[in-house]
Amino acid sequence: ILNVEQSPQSLHVQEGDSTNFTCSFPSSNFYALHWYRWETAKSPEALFVMTLNGDEKKKGRISATLNTKEGYSYLYIKGSQPEDSATYLCASGTSYDKVIFGPGTSLSVIP
Amino acid sequence: EAGVAQSPRYKIIEKRQSVAFWCNPISGHATLYWYQQILGQGPKLLIQFQNNGVVDDSQLPKDRFSAERLKGVDSTLKIQPAKLEDSAVYLCASSSRQGETEAFFGQGTRLTVV
């Protein structure tokens, strides 16, 4: 994989449902994996930065895992709320200090 | 701490006109990024500065885009002349260390070229 890929492209869930997204990234020269949340009319906001294979991070109802050997990361949201509606971006940083963003997953949580 | 400041927030220009965007990063952040985000796509890195030196400008269309970061603090991004396909949100971000720490983003400038 030369680019950072994310799936699904968009997602609609009911309030209270749990959901997850996938980020695939080049495993060679990997340095760090970033997750950002981008709400409409606001700036992207960092959720997590992970560097080690097997890393798991959690912030409230949101958690993320990292597999650097196979080049993927999962973002989980437990009990989705309407305020979780946003575009979730992942970005891969390489040892060459380049940060490449994926296209994002657009999440809509229906009350 | 104060966040990344960008101006203007919105700009509408005609094709072939020029436009400039300004960014003031978080104090002390050595790394500054300019991204272009076209609707439906993820942000694309245009240029990355480390202090006042360019680290990566491989995706900057140099025939029409230019950027500078004098004194390693504020930065300006210029487009001259603009094309219709330049319509996008231009995001500035800064971080304390390249790649391994989170980037802090400004609110962006939404450019519409008509």
Image (spheres, grey):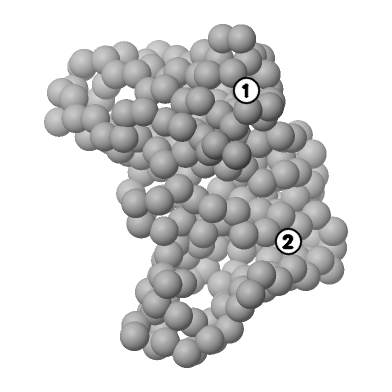
Label 1: element kind: strand
Residue type at numbered disc 1 = Phe
The residue under label 2 is A71
> Residue A47 appears in which quarter of the rendering?
bottom right
Query: Given the image, what chain letter belongs to the residue carrying mark 1?
Result: B
**Residue A83: percent from left, percent from top:** 42, 72
Measured as percent of width and height from the top left, residue B103 is found at 62, 42
Residue displayed at 79% across by 39% down: A95
- Please give the name of the residue rendered at 79% of the width and 60% of the height, measured from the top-left corner: A68
Crowding at dot 1, Cα within 10 Å, few <14 / some 14-19 / many 20+, comes out as: many
User: Please, which residue is most extreme toward the top here?
Assistant: B70
**In the rendered structure, the residue with mark 2 lies on which chain?**
A
Q: CA distance from mark 2 to mark 1?
A: 27 Å
The numbered mark at residue B72 is none
The residue wearing badge 1 is: B49
Q: Nearer the viewer, residue B109 or A19?
A: B109
> Which residue type does callout 2 highlight?
Gly
**Which quadrant of the structure image shows residue B12?**
top left
Residue at left 40%, top 51%? A42
Q: Do the dots labelled 2 and 1 sit on one chain?
A: no
* Front of the two marks 2 and 1: 1
